[in-house]
Image (spheres, rainbow, N blue to C red):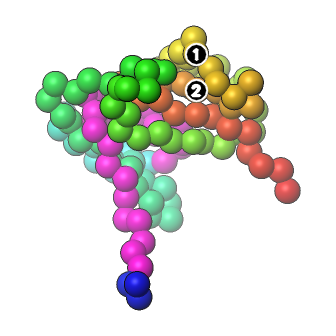
Amino acid sequence: MTVTADLAMVNLDSSDPAAHADFYHRVLGWEITHSEADYAMINRPDGVSIGFGRVDGYQPPRWPDETSAKRYHLDLYVDDLTVAEKEFVAAGATKPEFQPGDGRWVVLLDPVGQPFCICPRPQG
């Protein structure tokens, strides 16, 4: 293959795009560049974007049910797991009881129920 592509953006299904974008705006610090009932978007200064589109009847995956449809999974680097967990929960995330990884990372659920992990930022 001689043609390669660059990732333009990631679009995520959502039951509440504006709230979903606001949550990740707070977690990532990215700018909200569009926010309506049916679609919202956040952007990083270098142009990377995440969009959130309303899906009628949206049902989040059931964590940790491996037979449940999981639409995506984000891993986010943080400097301090404990501090980040506290701040992200205050911003609207929840922490499910099931936690794999022996404490090396933390699984959280965003406000519409999608799982994401916070991981220690690599040193060096």
Query: Where 122 falls versus 13 (above or below)?
Result: below
Q: Quadrant of residue 3?
A: bottom left
Amino acid type, callout 2: Val
Q: Position of residue 75 (x, y in %)?
A: 57, 42
Question: What secondary structure is marked by label 1?
Answer: loop
- Crowding near the residue tagged with mark 2, few <14, some 14–19, many ≥20 C-alpha atoms within 10 Å: many
Amino acid type, callout 1: Phe
The residues colored magenta run 4-30
Q: Which quadrant, please, contains the N terminus?
A: bottom left
Question: What secondary structure is marked by label 2?
Answer: strand
Q: Position of residue 119 (x, y in %)?
A: 68, 38
Look at 22% across and 27% down and name the residue there. Answer: 58
Q: Residue 20 in magenta?
A: yes
User: According to the image, label 2 marks what residue?
Assistant: 107
Of labels 1 and 2, earlier in sequence is: 1
Q: Position of residue 110 (x, y in %)?
A: 45, 27
User: According to the image, label 1 marks what residue?
Assistant: 98
